């Protein structure tokens, strides 16, 4: 039992050195998808207003290249109180050659 516990501790400490610790992984595609949901029964006009406000806030954020919001009712079978915003991040190369947020 003790040998198993020591083995798990050793495996855990080894994995801390192997697993990436950054917030944005190397395989990141440089975009964020944001789900927006208002209270049940919210009108399409209110949802559009919230999406436009979210787009303005995202565009004013450093590191954001572009953002586009779409209310869900315009995409098909979803209620008018939901929306989605897709945000592209601005990338640049660091002096070490690694990609990083600008």
Image (cartoon, rainbow, N blue to C red):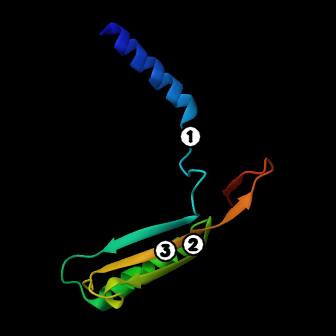
Query: Residue at coordinates 50% horizontally, 66% vertically from top-left?
Result: 32
Q: Quadrant of residue 1?
A: top left
Front-lying residue, 101 or 99 = 99
Query: Residue at coordinates 70% horizontally, 55% vertically from top-left?
Result: 99
Which residue in the protein does label 1 denote? Answer: 20
* Location of residue 23 with respect to 54 vertically, above or below: above
* Location of residue 94 with respect to 63 vertically, above or below: above
Query: How far across and how far down the image is residue 40, in percent?
Result: 19, 78
Q: Which mark is residue 29?
A: none
Q: Secondary structure at mark 3?
A: strand
Report, in whole angstroms, how far the alpha carbon at label 3 lies from the one at label 2. 15 Å
Classify residue 28 as left or right of residue 73: right
Q: Secondary structure at mark 1?
A: loop
Crowding at label 3, few (<14), some or many (≥20) Cα neighbours within 10 Å?
Answer: some
Which residue in the protein does label 2 denote? Answer: 60
Which residue in the protein does label 3 denote? Answer: 86
Front-lying residue, 13 or 91 = 13
Classify residue 71 as left or right of residue 28: left
Query: Residue at coordinates 33% horizontally, 8% vertically from top-left?
Result: 2
* Location of residue 77 with respect to 5 vertically, above or below: below
Report, in whole angstroms, how far the alpha carbon at label 3 lies from the one at label 1. 25 Å
Q: Quadrant of the C terminus?
A: bottom right
Classify residue 94 as left or right of residue 91: right
């Amino acid at each position: 039992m003790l040998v198993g516990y020591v083995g798990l501790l050793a495996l855990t400490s080894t994995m801390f050195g192997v697993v990436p610790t950054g917030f944005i992984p190397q395989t990141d595609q440089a975009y964020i998808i944001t789900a927006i949901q208002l209270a049940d029964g919210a009108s399409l006009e209110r949802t559009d207003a919230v999406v436009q406000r979210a787009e303005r806030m995202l565009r004013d954020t450093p590191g954001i290249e572009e953002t586009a919001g779409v209310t869900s009712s315009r995409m098909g079978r979803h209620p008018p109180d939901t929306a989605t915003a897709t945000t592209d991040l601005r990338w640049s190369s660091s002096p070490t050659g690694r990609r990083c947020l600008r």
